[in-house]
Image (cartoon, helix red, strand yellow):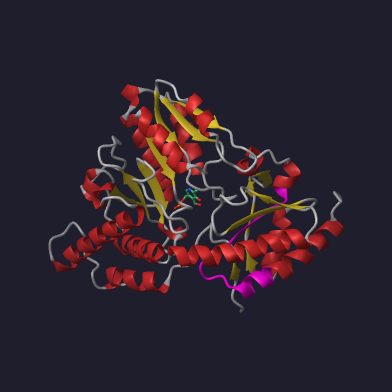
Amino acid sequence: MSKTIYFDNAATTAVRDEVFAAMTPYLRESYGNPSSLYKIARDAKNAIEKAREQVAAAIGALPSEVFFTGSGTEAVNWALIGGAFANKSKGNHIITSSIEHHAVLHSCKYLEKHGFEVTYLPVDKFGIISVDELERAIRPETILISIMYANNEIGTIQPIAEIGAIAKARGIIFHTDAVQAIGNLPVDVKADNVDLLALSAHKLHGPKGVGALYIRSGVNVLAFIHGGAQERGRRAGTENVASIVGLGEASTLAKAEMDEKIRKMRKLRDKIIVTILERVPNAQLNGHPEKRLPGNASISFDFVEGESILLMLDMKGIAASSGSACTSGALNPSHVLMALGLPHEKAHGSLRISVGRYNTEEDADTLIEAIVPIVEKLRAMSPLC
Ligand code: PLP
């Protein structure tokens, strides 16, 4: 069978060889429980602490500020729910944006059911929040601001340092969901005045099912999982040692290769965007033209369904993603594309191509040569044309 041409790196990425090699000793030889006292357990414990240092170095944090979790989603839930309840005596108001990942939006809905009030800031047509609007939304009882670093669907990057400065000046905790940013953008929690930051290993060529929450020293966040003393008593449960080691290794490699990776991905991304927009009429780029993730190309095609393009690309061995989510048999256009003000039809006709470190010029050419006739063919069949 021929290899998949993979353009869905925002959904997940392949585990790198170096990461896999770093992980396997902790599944097979040093498989001890890190809480035990003998050698193979101590080795596992030391490996976790090394990974903590690696993740901390990748984001400009101290190792003592990094806590491992079971996913990016868990890290986000911990930041929001643990942060909100720990600071309830100071106020009950939270500010977020309307284009956050469901990990944030559904945590906010949960908090609303438990006495918190949430302001969902709108975004402009590029997907950027207004910093002035954010300042106006702050109330005396605002305790938490949660704005994503970069959007998973349209790639738009938010003015994180500006938001961090405002939150710091007002004494409000600032959380950023940086799941799409880590590994794709240089991130420094101190420079950006970030208090809480969620990340996930599988977006940066690490394994699935492991993430981390950065908690700035001194920020009050409740313990999230109760039980043993792991993660300094704040996230109990025997550690997923091999995966944590994988996250550490992936973080180090991503930081070391950041500039080169960004340059390469941008070049491929721009070639894909420019050529498709040139060759396919009635197609538009979603998100900001410059302030976007280096690998993200989100494009809407008039008169066709994104899902149909996906299926036809899949038949050619190409993997990408669309802007619709299939829930209970119905296709709902993405809340992100709707928040940009896109009409339903355009939101339904969107395709997300996410370039990664393994994509080549040849992959990009194959993708372009596939998409152009697919859109033509679908339009020829479409009752909307
Ligand atoms: N936040 C963003 C912006 C994401 O893109 C994702 C995953 O797609 C998550 C959170 C959730 O991360 P995980 O898959 O590790 O739970």
Count numbered badges in the picture.
Answer: 0
The residue lying at 37 percent from left, 40 percent from top is 79
Residue 59 position, x and y percent, is 35, 53
Residue 280 as seen in the image, left or right of residue 287 = right
Picture quarter containing residue 381? bottom right
Residue 349 position, x and y percent, is 73, 51
Q: Nearer the viewer, residue 169 or 92?
A: 169
Picture quarter containing residue 142? top left
**Residue 356 at least partly seen:** no
* In the rendered image, the vertical position of residue 167 relative to residue 10, given as above or below: above
Q: If the image is split into quadrants, where does the N terminus sit?
A: bottom right
* In the rendered image, the vertical position of residue 67 relative to residue 106, given as above or below: below
The residue lying at 78 percent from left, 60 percent from top is 280
* In the rendered image, the vertical position of residue 95 relative to residue 297, given as above or below: above
Residue 280 as seen in the image, left or right of residue 215 = right
Q: Which residues are magenta?
A: 348-367
Residue 361 colored in magenta in the image: yes
The residue lying at 56 percent from left, 60 percent from top is 295
Q: Nearer the viewer, residue 278 or 215?
A: 278
Residue 150 colored in magenta in the image: no
Residue 4 position, x and y percent, is 60, 72
